[in-house]
Image (spheres, grey):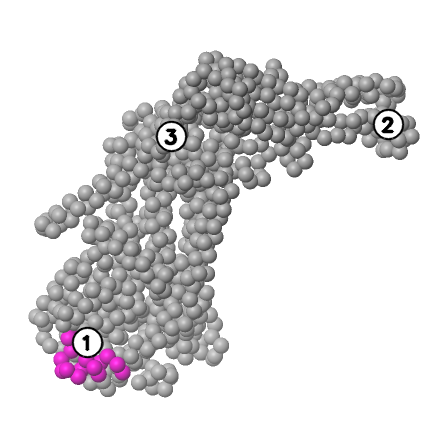
Amino acid sequence: MITLERVSRLVIAGVATALALGLIARTSAAPLSFHAGSTPRLRLSWSARPERIEVCRTLSAEELAQRLEHMRQRVSCEGRFATYALRVESDGQVIGEAVVHGAGLRHDRPLYLLREFDVAPGVRRVRVSFTRREKTDDDAAAFAKTASTGSDTGLFAGRAQRESAEHARRAGAAIPARLALDTTLTFAPRQVMIVTFAPERRALVLLGGSGRP
Amino acid sequence: MRPFERPFRRLLAAFDAAATRAYGYAWNPFYQSGTVAVAMLLVLIGTGLYLLLFYRLGSPWASVGRLAADPWLGAWIRGLHRYASDVFVLAAALHAFRMFAQGRSWGPRTLAWVSGLILFGAGLVCAWTGFVMAWDSFGERLAREGGRLLDVLPVLSEPLSRIFAGDGPVPSAFFFVNLFVHIAVPLVMGVGLWLHVSRLARPSLLPPRGLMWGMIGTLVAAAVIVPAPLGPAADPFVLAQTTPTDLTIAWWLPLSERFSPGAVWATVLFLAAGALSVPGLVRRPRTGSLAPSVVDPRLCTGCNQCPQDCPWGAITMVTREDERPTLVALVDPARCVSCGICAGSCAPMGVGPPGRTGRDQLGALRLLVLPELADGGALPIVAVCCGQGSPAHVVALRARGAHVHTVSCVGNLHTSVIELFVRRGAPGVIVFGCPPRDCLGREGPKWLHERVFNDREAELQPRVDRQRVQIATLSPGDGRASLAAFDDFARAIALLDRPVRESAEDFGAVCDPVSAGVGDGAP
C-alpha cells in the first residue's frame, strides 16, 4: 500500500542518492591546481655513459705467462668514471650548479640527469654547460699509444687491434668531455623547454621551442 | 568498548542512522560496505574487460578518447568503471572504519583486518595505474608523482621520472608494465579476498540482489548523465594549471606533492604500521564477556548443531575421550569471537561463553529477574534487546511499560529463556535484534528466527504460543519503526487472554533437560 510515509521515504532516498552520486561525480574530476603560477620551465634531461678515465700499460711477456690463457689481455687498464660539472645560466645569472656522476654505488652506471629550473617568461639567454671535471688525456688515444706497441702472432693475431677498437667504441659511446648550449629562447607562460643530449650529434639540443618535435 | 573506540562508534551510529532514515535498514548501503566493495570489484572487472579490448599501448590517450566519444557503449562503460572504482574505495574505507569502530579488528579477526588493509592498498594501487593508463594530464601527474616516489628507492636502475621528461616518447614498455600491474593486482586481490573471509562460515560476498542491481543501475545512470571526463592529453612541454583529479582515489596527491619523497614514504610507512598494529593496540583480555566459548562434554550430545550455526567456523566435532559413542564439540579459542551463538544453538545447553550458556541465562533469569518481576504481580511484556542497541530505545520501551531484558546478541538468546518468560506469566516476548547485516555475531537474527519459527535445533518448544512471541529489528535511525512494532505487538497481545502462570517447579520439570544429576548447574 502506498502511504505518505512510504512516498516521503522514497523521495528522501532519491534525493540522498542523487546527492551522493553528484558528489562522487564532482570529486571524480575536481579541477585540482597543479602548477599555480604561469612561470615557464627549463628542463634538462638526458642519460649517457660517463667517460672512463684509465691509465693503461702493456703487460710484459712474463706477466702474461702467469695468467690463464683466456685471461691474457695484452693491455691492462685501471681507472674510474669521470664526473661532470653542470652549470645553468639565465641572462648571465647562475640558476643551477651541480656535480653529476654515474649512477650506482660505484658510479659505474650511466649518468641520469633530470633537473628543472623556473625561468621568467620572455626572451632569455640560456647557457648550459656540462663539463668533465677531471683533466686528462683522451682515453682512447692513451690506449692507442699503448696498444700499438708490440705485435700479435699466433693465437693473439689481431687481438691488439680488436682491443683497441673496443676501447675506441667505448670512448665514443661516452658523453663528450665538454658540452655546451648557448642560445636565446623565448619562454611563453607555462611552456617547458627541454635540453637534452643527442648521442648521434654528440651535442646538447633544445626541444620544445619553435621547432618542437 | 574502550573509550578510544567510543567516539568512532558514535560517529558510525550517526552515519548509520542517517542512511537508515533515507533507505530503511534493509537497503542501508552502509550495512553492506564490505559486500558493496566486492560487488564494485566485480563491476570493475567486467567493465575493465570491455575497455581492455579497445585500449592501445601505442596510443593510450587516443584510444581512451575514442572510447569516451562512443555514446553507445564506450562512454558509459568507462564512466561506470570510473564511478565503480570510486564507490569501491569509499565502501572499503567505510568497511574498515566500521570494523574498527565496532571493535571487530582484533583477536580472531586480526587476519581479516590485516588482509583487508592490504586489499584496500591494492585497490588504491590498481586505481592509480588505471588513471595512468588514460595518459591525460591527470594520468601524467600521477605517473610523475609515482616516479618521484619510486626513484628514491633503490629498485630501478634508471630513474622512472626521466621517461616522462619529454626528451623522448614515453616507451610502450611503460604502458605495458602499467597495464600488467592494473590487471594483475585484481587477480591478487581475488586471493586476498579469499584470505579475508577465510575465517568466516558462509561469508556473504555480495549485497542483497535488489540493492546490488539498484546500485549498479544508479551508477550506470550517473555514467550516462555525467560521463567520466578525460583530461587533455599529457604534454611534457606544457605545465598544466589544473588537472581533472579524482579526489576519491587521489585525495593524497596534493599533500604528497608538497613533501619530499622521503617524508612521503615515512608518512606512508607510519600510517601503514599504525593501521596494521591496530589489532595489537585495541586487543583486550579474553575474559568476562570476551572469553571464548567452552564445551561441557557431559552435556554435549554430539548433535552437530553448534558447528553448523557458528558463524566463524570455530567449532568442530571430535572423538570423545569417554566411553559415550557420540562425538563432542570442540571450540577453537583462536577463532571464537565470543558471540555466543553456539549457546543459542545448543538444546542441552552444553556450549557457550562462560556466563552466557543457556543454563547461565536461565539461572540468571530465575535468580535475579523473575523474582523481582513477579513481586508486583502480573508480568509486563518482555522486550529482549540486543546489547548493541541504542540506550534511548531501551528508555522508550521502559516508558511504554515493557520489561527490558538485554542479551549480548539475539543469536545468543536461548529459546528456553523466551519459554520461561511466557510460562512465568509474561503476556508476550518481543526480541529486538540488530539489522541482519550489522549483527556483530553475523548471523544472530537469522538463527533466532529459525529457532523460534522454523524448528531449527534448539527450537522454541511447540507448547509456547507463537502469537506471544515476535522478532523485530532495531536499527539506529529507525527507532520509530521499532517502537511502532512494539506498539503493534502490545495491541495484538492485549487481544489475547492473560497467560496461565506456571510455578517454578512445574517449569523446571519440563524445561530443564539435565537437571537430574548430569550437569553441574542444575537449579
Secondary structure of the residue carrying numbered label 3: loop
Q: Nearer the viewer, residue B416 or B459?
A: B416
Q: Residue at x 29, y 26 (%)?
A: B71
Residue mark closest to the camera, 3 vs 1? 3
Name the front one of labels 3 and 2. 3
Quick one: B254 or A126, which is closer to the camera? A126
Residue nearer the viewer, B211 or B438: B438
Q: What residue does disc 3 label?
A: A36
Name the element at disc 2.
loop
> Dot 3 surroundings within 10 Å: few (below 14), some, or many (20 or more)?
few
Residue A93 at least partly seen: yes
Q: Position of residue B365 (x, y in %)?
A: 26, 79
Place of residue B258 in the rendered image (x, y in percent of width and height, measured from the top left): 43, 38
Residue B255 falls left or right of residue B367: right
Residue at screen point 17% across, 76% down: B426
Identify the amino acid type marked 3.
Ala
Q: Residue at x 26, y 61 (%)?
A: B434
Q: Is residue B63 visible?
A: no
Dot 1 and dot 2 within a common chain: no
| Chain containing mark 3 | A
Q: Amino acid at mark 1?
A: Val
- Magenta span of residues: B367-381
Residue B120 in the image: above or below residue B345: above
Disc 1 and disc 2: Cα gap in Å? 108 Å
**B91 is within the stretch colored magenta:** no
* Residue annotated with mark 2: A59
Tell me where residue A15 appears, x and y as whole percent: 19, 43
